[in-house]
Image: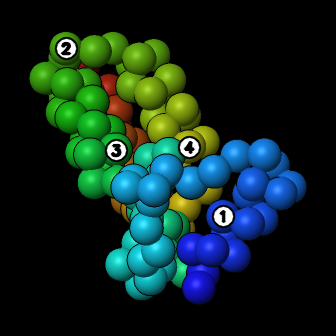
Amino acid sequence: MWREQINGFLSEKLKIQLHPQKSRIIPLSRSIDFVGFRNFYHHKLLRKRNISGMKRKIISFEKDKVGFGDIIESYRGWQAYAMWANTNKLREKIKKEIIELILKKFNED
């Protein structure tokens, strides 16, 4: 039922069709993985690999493999991307980790 209605709309209005074997209707409670987010009915979350990627960069900064400018640039880009999901607490936690590392490095010098 839903598939036929969706296919009808797509072919009539947009002149495109769903791939018969690759498309399926699933409940949003299971989430849909799309453009770096896990999309649910009422909210979006980042993929775990996007979060762990930022954490790896923090570890690289801690081990002096990347510099201050690099970690700030990485965080700003990641934060601009992450703000499109429901990530307020996560972004604050990551920011706090970076600030603590910067202060620790500053006090060592």
The Cα–Cα distance between marks 4 and 3, rounded to whole angstroms, is 10 Å
Label 4 or label 1, whichever comes before in sequence order: 1
Q: Is residue 86 left or right of residue 104?
A: right
Q: Position of residue 75 (x, y in %)?
A: 46, 35
Label 2 or label 3, whichever comes before in sequence order: 3
Camera-near label (3 vs 1) is 1
The quadrant of the image that shows the N terminus is bottom right
Q: Quick one: SS at disc 4? A: helix
The Cα–Cα distance between marks 3 and 1, rounded to whole angstroms, is 33 Å
Q: Which residue in the protein does label 1 denote? A: 7
- Residue 50, labelled with which disc? 3
Q: Position of residue 27 (x, y in %)?
A: 44, 83
Q: Decide: marks 2, 4 in contact (CB < 8 A)?
A: no
Label 4 or label 3, whichever comes before in sequence order: 3
Q: Is residue 62 above or below residue 5?
A: above
The Cα–Cα distance between marks 2 and 3, rounded to whole angstroms, is 20 Å
Amino acid type shown at disc 1: Asn
Q: Describe the colour scheme in one phrase.
A: rainbow
Amino acid type shown at disc 2: Lys
Q: Is residue 33 above or below residue 89?
A: above
The Cα–Cα distance between marks 4 and 1, rounded to whole angstroms, is 32 Å
Amino acid type shown at disc 3: Asn
